[in-house]
Image: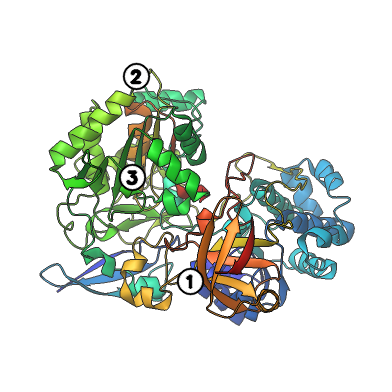
Amino acid sequence: MNDLSDAEMIMVMGSNTTEQHPLASTRIFEALENGAELYVVDPRKIRLTDFAQGYAPIEPGTNLPMINAMIHVIIKENLVDENFIKDRTENYEEMKKSVEDCTPEWAESISKVKADTIREFARKYAMTDKAMIVFTMGVTQQTTGVKSIRALANLAMITGHVGRPSTGINPLRGQNNVQGAGDMGALPDFLPGYQRPEWPRTKDRFSKAWGDFSCLRGRNIIEMFDLMEEGTMKAAYIVGENPVLSDPDQIHTLHCLEKLPFLVVQDIFLTETAKFADVVLPAASFLEREGTYTNTDRRVQMIHKVIEPVGDSKPDWEIMVEIMKRIGMDVNYQSPSDIMDEINATTEIYGGISHDRIREVGIQWPCPNKEHPGTPILHVGEFIRGKGLFTVNDFEFIGDQRSEEYPFIVTTGRVTHQYHTGTMTRKVWTLALEYPEGFVEIHTKDAEELGIKNHQPVRITSARGSIVAPALITNRINEKTLFVPFHFAESPANRLTGRNLDPIINIPALKVSAVRIEVE
Amino acid sequence: MKRVETTCGYCGCGCGIYVNVADDDTVLGVAPSYNHVVSKGKLCSKGWHGFAFVRDSRRLTSPLIRQKDGTFREASWDEALDKVAAGFKEAMIDEDNTDRIGIVSSARCTNEENFLMAKMARAGLKTSSIDHCARL
C-alpha cells in the first residue's frame, strides 16, 4: 500500500476506493499531492473522479473490451516495453494477434467509453514509468471477470509495469481477512498456501500432518447451494457469513436453505442466515480473541484480546476444536499460537511467520523461514511460474443485457459507513445515522422521464425478484444505469442479482443485472 | 483503564488501533496507532466508530437449538456441540462427503481459524467443499 503514495500514475478500475478502502485512498491522495495523475474507470462518478485527470464512464460489465483496446493502442503506437516482453514473458505474438481487431472504436461501441478517452488512458499508462492499476469487485464480479484480470495482466506486462515499486495490478481486498481465508485453504481447489490438492507433494505433506484427508477439487459456495437445491447436500456449517444477503439471487438462496436437512451457523448475531439454522453457535467478536489477520498487502498482523467474550460466547477457534474432537479428530491446541505452529510446518508461504515475530509489526508473505524478512513486492525478477504468460481474452456477452422489459442495468456496491451485510455496522448508531436505509441511484434524465422524484420510493424488478427503496437522483451515474448498496436487509440488492457466473471461477455477475424501475 | 493495541476488523486495509477499555471491560473508544505501517495514525469512520456492536443487546450469548415448532431455545454448549457432531455424522455416510457436506468459512475469522476449518473439512468431515466469501 505504501507503493501507492510513490506512484506517478494510478488507474483505478471498478474500485470506489474512498468509500470501501478509505485508508488506501489516503495513499492515492498522497500520490496526487506528489504530482501523480489519476485515471478512473467506473459507471459512477465516484469521489475519486473529482481529483482525476481522466474519467471513463464505463458500461457495467464491459471492462474487458476497454482493456483489450488499451492493449491494442499501446501495440499499434509502439509504446510496448520490448525488453520486458523478450526477457520475462511468453506467448506475446498470439496475444497480439488476438487484439488486432480490438480498436478503440470497437470498444466504444460496447463499453460506451469514447475511443479518444481509451487512447488517452492507454498512452498515459504506457508512457508513465511508475504506473499502478488498482481494482476490486467492479472488475471481477462480471461474467468476464477472470478474462478481465488476465487482460489487465497483459496490459501490465506489455508495458513492463510489474515487479517494480509502484507498479503492478493491485486488487484491494474487501474484508479484513479475505486474503488470509484464501491463504489458509478455505477454498475448494486449494489446501493452505495455494497448494493444489492433486499435487503429490501436497498429499505427502498434509497426510503427515492431518492423516487421511479429502483431496478433491470441491464445490464452491455457488455450487454448494445448487447441491442443496438438488437435495444432495445434507449438512452445512456456515461461520461468520450471511449468504442470505451476500449471495446472488436471494429467493434461490432462501429456497436452498429451507431445503437443507441440517444447518449449523456460527456468528455473533442472529443473522438473516442464522434464522434457518438447526443449531446456532455464539461466537466471540474480534475484540474478544487472539490470532492473526492478513491484509490486502499480504501483511500478517496480530489481533489481541481486548475484552472477555460477551455472555457465553466463545472464540471461533475454541468452538471448532470442540467440534473436531466430537467428530473423532485427535487435536490438542491450547492457543492460536499452537495452530500457527502447524501452519508454519505445512504452509511454505507462512513458514517463518510466528506470533512472536509479528507482535510489533506484521510480516508480508511469502516468508518461508524464521530468518526471512518477508516480501513486499511479488514477481521481482521472475514470475512464480517463471515466464509471464500472455493470454488471449476474447470478449463475449454472457448474462444480463438491457431489453424492452428490463431497460436498465443495476450495479451493486457499498457505502463507507456500512460494512458488507450490515450485521455489525447497522448496530452502531453513529454509523447507522449516516445511511439508515438503502437507496437507488438514478440519473436525473431517467428520473425525469419516468416521473420519479427525489427520495420517492421506487420498485426495481429483475427476472429474479424485486425490491423497493427510495430514489436518489444524481448526475453522478451513467444514464440507464442504477446503483443499489447491498448492506440493507429491507431492500436486499441480491434479490435482483442472478446466477450468471464467470465460467472459469464461478464468480457471480453481481455488478450487472437487467431491471426495470417504476414509482411504487 | 487499559489500552490494547490490535488490528481493525473491517476492510482489508488492516489499520492499527488502540482500544481503550474500562476496568469493568466496557469499550470506551478507539485511538489510531501513529506508527502503524498501514494507517500511520489515520482511521476511517468505521475504524473510529464501528465497535459499539460488541456490547449490543442483540449479541448471541448462548447456543440455540431449533425446536419442533420452529422456534429456538437456549442450550448448553455440551448439548449444542453434541447435536452439531451428531448432525455431521449422520450426513457422513460416504468415504468422501464432498457433495454431502458444505463448509463456508469466513473472512471475519483469523488465519488460525480458517486453517482449522480447512483441516476439519478435509481431514475430519472428509469433504473438499469448503469456501468463503471471496467471490461475493
Please state the chain letter of the residue tagged with numbered disc 2 in the rendered image.
Answer: B
Marks 3 and 2, how far apart in space?
A: 24 Å
Viewer-side label of 1, 3: 3
Q: Position of residue A219 (x, y in %)?
A: 49, 33
Q: Are marks 1 and 2 in contact (CB under 8 Å)?
A: no
Dot 2 amino acid type = Ile
Residue with the most extreme left position: B24
Q: Which residue is mark 1?
A: A22
Marks 1 and 3, how far apart in space?
A: 34 Å
Bin the neighbour count of mark 2 within 10 Å (Cα to Cα): few under 14, some 14-19, many 20 and up. few
Residue at 31% of width from left, 71% of height from top?
Answer: A428
Count of numbered tags: 3
Q: Which residue is mark 3?
A: A276
Viewer-side label of 3, 2: 3
Q: Which residue is mark 2?
A: B93
Q: Position of residue B31 (x, y in %)?
A: 30, 76
Q: Residue A279, labelled with which disc? A: none
Bin the neighbour count of mark 3 within 10 Å (Cα to Cα): few under 14, some 14-19, many 20 and up. many
Dot 3 amino acid type = Phe
